[in-house]
Image (cartoon, rainbow, N blue to C red):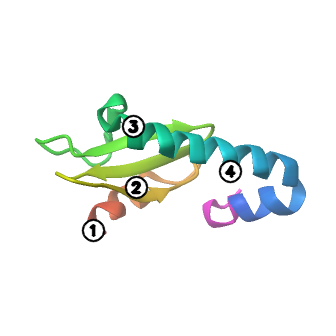
Amino acid sequence: MPCRTSMRLLVNQQPLNAIKVGDALLATIDRITASPFLFRQCEEIPTKGKIYRKATCYSWPVIYRIKINEIIILGIIHGSCRPVRIKKLRKIK
């Protein structure tokens, strides 16, 4: 299944599962907000300060960056995508 269409297919073909995944993603983001260092460093974007983290929700990694006073969600990418797509998230400001 192509990466870009994963969520669209899920919504169109399995709307109840899409709601379940959406709710789980929101819960994961709440956990990130509460404890940003709870999740592992993102291996695809290594840094000395370990500011890039990855929380996984079902097959959807949530990639985020920790700054001094904020947490920035960089992307939610289906696990079937190539790691190159995760590396590109580093360029997001």
Question: Mark 2 is on which residue type?
Answer: Ile
Q: Is residue 1 left or right of residue 26?
A: right
What is the crowding at mark 4: few (fewer than 14 residues within 10 Å), some, or many (at least 20)?
some
Where does the C terminus fall, quadrant-wise?
Answer: bottom left
Mark positioned earlier in the residue sequence (3 or 1): 3
Q: Quadrant of residue 33?
A: top left
Is most of the magenta stretch helix, strand or loop?
helix
The residue that mark 4 highlights is 22
Quadrant of res 46: top left
* Total numbered labels: 4
Span highlighted in magenta in the image:
1-6
At which x and y percent is residue 23?
Answer: 68, 46
Tell which of 36 and 54 is nearer to you. 36
Residue 38 to residue 44: above or below: above
Left or right: 86 in relation to 37: right
> Disc 4 and disc 2: Cα gap in Å?
20 Å
Q: Amino acid at mark 3?
A: Ala
